[in-house]
Image (cartoon, helix red, strand yellow):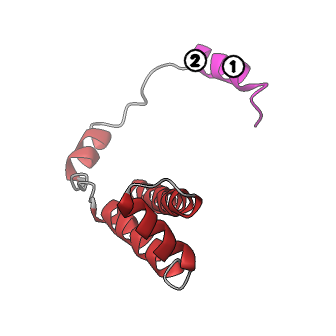
Amino acid sequence: MSDLHDDEIETLLRRNFDGPVPDAGFSGKLMQRLPPRRRRTAWPLWGGILAGIGACGWSLLRSPLLGDGLHDWLRGEWSMPAVALLLTAAGMSLLTCWWGATEADAR
C-alpha cells in the first residue's frame, strides 16, 4: 500500500467495524496463558560501547596519530593529532553505541 490511500482505507475500515468478534472468551484465556514479557537486557549496549572502545584502540594502535595525539592531549594542547584522535574515538564509540542500541531493541 502507499501513504496516498492510507487515510481512505482506515476510514473505510472504521466505518464498517462492528466491534470485537465474539469468541466465547478465547482471546482473554489466550492472553492469560502467554508468558510474561521478557525484561530488556542492557548487556548489548554495554558490549557495543566496549567493542567500540576496543576497536578504536586497536585500529589506532600502530598509528603515530595515537601516540602524538595522546601525548598532546595529556599535555593540554589541542593539536591536529589530538583533535583527530578524539573525533575518531568519539565517532567509533557512537557507531558501536548505535549498533548496541539497535541490537537491544531487536530483542
Q: Which residue is mark 2?
A: 14
Residue 50 percent coordinates (x, y): 35, 69
Residue 75 occupies quadrant: bottom left
Residue shown at 47% from the left, 76% from the top: 67
Dots 1 and 2: beta carbons under 8 Å? no
Q: Is residue 24 above or below residue 67?
A: above
- Numbered circle sitting on residue 66: none
- Which secondary structure class fits the magenta region best? helix
Q: Secondary structure at mark 2?
A: helix
Q: Is residue 107 visible?
A: no
The residue nearer to you, when weighing 84 against 78, is: 78
Q: Please give left or right for residue 63 compared with residue 90 in the image.
A: right
Residue shown at 49% from the left, 67% from the top: 69
Callout 1, which amino acid?
Asp
What is the magenta range? 1-16
Q: How many marks?
A: 2
Callout 2, which amino acid?
Arg
Specify which label sits upstream in the sequence, 1 or 2: 1
Q: Which residue is mark 1?
A: 7
Q: Secondary structure at mark 1?
A: helix
Residue 2 percent coordinates (x, y): 77, 34
Specify whether residue 5 is painted magenta: yes
If the image is split into quadrants, where does the C terminus sit?
bottom left
Q: Is residue 63 visible?
A: yes
Residue 36 percent coordinates (x, y): 21, 52
Residue 17 occupies quadrant: top right
